[in-house]
Image: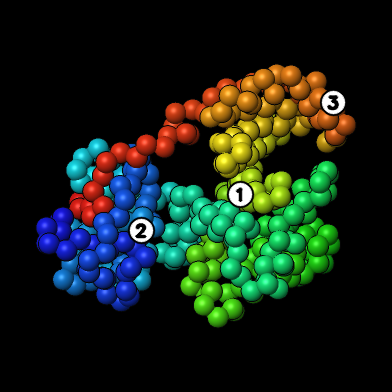
Amino acid sequence: MIDKGSQPLAPSSGVARPGVNLGNGPILPSITLIKGQIIEGVVVQLQPRLLVETSSSIFSAAISSAAYTLGERLLFKVLDPDLRPPRLELLRSGQLPDSLLAQQSAYLRSLLYRPNGLAPLQQWLSSYLSNTNLPSALAALLQEFWQLPSAPKALDIQKALLMSGLFSESRGKAKTLAGAMMGPAKAYNDLKALLQLLALEEGLEQQVKPLLEALHSSQIKSLDALLNSQLYYQWLMPWFEQQHLLITLQQNQQQRSQKQWSISLAHQGPELGTLHINLLLTQGITAREATASLHFASDTSWLAPLVNSSKHQLHSALQLHGIQLQQVSVGPIAETEGKTNPKTAHTILDVHV
């Protein structure tokens, strides 16, 4: 039920475990919900009513607390975001897509279906690369880690992928590509190892924990796709001095049979605004031949003339790697991609199950 008391729920940052702070803190900002979206929540209170905390809100769930425990992770599906309060459904194991990983534990399920899993890591990097309060030695290590050569080559991009933390567990095996190229995972060459080092610093453990969970989420999704004969890798790559690209590499079963890969690059920053690049890569008769189709999208006006005036340069650059540029297009960010005005929604939501 909606809490009708005189005291609003405090924001998530003010939640005191194992109970919930019901003090005079400010009400959380309005949140945006999308139909079909899956929301991850953690049980933070059992009595007098069950409360579930997400990254941006606290839900008062109209379900019995007897079957749940403090700290348990639950998944909710948005059925109707326009109702007040929105209508949500508690998802149980049988309602989720078949997954060997998801069947193992609620923790793995929450990581697997966590939307925008790398968002905490993106926000942290954006903050600490520009204005860091880290100890000087660790700050220097982070700055050194988060760099690419001024004119990066394909090998540099490959190393950036291996340094993303996705392959930390295989880095100790010399027979793997990651192990042969980079050696064992260390703080200077592996993002996960770097974060584990930061977590040892006094006062940083709780701050770094969600960043490690973000990497775990990306790893779990990659492994789950691999078990289903698909590819899904998502990682952050340095771009310019203190910025990053969110890269997603996908290949479903149909694309696998056609030797195709779908690659998307996303960036958001004060200089370039929102920028999306979608690439469809198709392997030719030989492994050294391929064709590419590119689509650029932005919420600013500078991109279209730049892309249209430099197509020949892009064509020449790809040809050096045996890639024939088949199609290039440019346009605005789609409404669903660039939607920034949140719908008005209650912060304290009733969950009907």
Return the x and y of residue 216 as percentages of the image width and height: 56, 62
Q: Earlier in the sequence, mark 2 or mark 1?
A: 2
Foreground mark, 1 or 3, reads 3
Q: Amino acid under label 1? A: Gln
Q: CA distance from mark 2 to mark 1?
A: 22 Å
Q: Helix or strand or loop: what does disc 1 sit on?
A: strand
Q: Quadrant of residue 245?
A: top right
Instruction: From the image, tell me which residue sits under label 3.
Output: 316
Callout 1–callout 3 Cβ contact below 8 Å: no
Nearer-the-camera pick, 32 or 284: 32
* Callout 2 crowding tier (Cα within 10 Å): few <14, some 14–19, many ≥20: some
Q: Amino acid under label 3? A: Ser
Q: Helix or strand or loop: what does disc 2 sit on?
A: loop
Against 246, is 186 above or below? below
Quick check: 196 left or right of 25? right
Quick check: 94 left or right of 138? left
Residue 54: give its label. Answer: 2
Q: CA distance from mark 2 to mark 3?
A: 48 Å
Nearer-the-camera pick, 168 or 302: 302
Q: Earlier in the sequence, mark 2 or mark 3?
A: 2
Q: Residue at x 68, y 72 (%)?
A: 136
Q: Quadrant of the N terminus?
A: bottom left
Against 217, is 157 above or below? above
